[in-house]
Amino acid sequence: MNSDPNLPQPKEIRVTGVKTLKLVGCVYYGDPFHSNEEWSTENEIGVTWSRFQRLCYFHDEMLHKEALGDVAYEVHIQPDDYKDTGNFYVYVGVEVKNLDEMPIEMFGKTLPSTKYVVFTFKGEDMFNGGNYIWNEWLPDSKYDESYPYMVLAYDKNRFRGINDPKSEVDFYVPVKLKRPNNE
């Protein structure tokens, strides 16, 4: 692949095995940037994170019992009409063992079983990581997206806030092998 020097470069790229994520969290639908720009705590994604954090504090005991690890997830799900409306679902949550017991104000989501290509971006590169993934890496790779969503993973040991240059974010892109052109 010919790297565009103007695009951010990931710190690391890896492919996972097939995994299924079970999440408990909060959801938003619409244009999350209509009131403020991307990567702002004041847009609807930031507001959804604030609501999620308040509920986590309130339901700490229940969530602590079920949660797996120290990673919080932000899932962007594109519905069929995304290209026409610009609206999509934003789901923020934590991975849990099962969805049998969860706070009534929160929603459970099971993402499909799939492989992911995980791109780790650091500092300011995280703001434009998607440009690198979808404009450079994915078109030239042996993969296609397997589902119309992507996941941002915020590990509390590596993410220190959007303004900290040492922060790292993992972009999870669900993938499948490309089909040969004759199929």
Image (tube, rainbow, N blue to C red):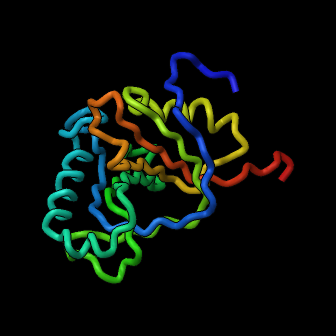
Residue located 62% across and 50% down the image: 15
Where does the image place residue 45, in percent across and percent down from the top left? 26, 47
Q: Is residue 48 above or below residue 84?
A: below
Q: Is residue 84 above or below residue 133?
A: below
Query: Seen from this angle, which residue lies furthest right?
Result: 182
Q: Is residue 83 above or below residue 38?
A: below
Left or right of 137, for residue 153:
left
The answer to whether residue 89 is visible is no
Left or right of 85, for residue 146:
right
Where does the image place residue 44, in percent across and percent down from the top left? 23, 46
Residue 24 quadrant:
bottom left
Q: Name the foreground residue: 130 vs 15.
A: 15
Residue located 46% across and 35% down the image: 121
Where does the image place residue 149, in percent across and percent down from the top left? 48, 52
Point out the image quarter for the N terminus.
top right
Where does the image place residue 154, in percent across and percent down from the top left? 36, 48
Q: Is residue 88 above or below residue 35?
A: below
Q: Name the foreground residue: 32 vs 56.
A: 56
Residue located 37% across and 78% down the image: 99
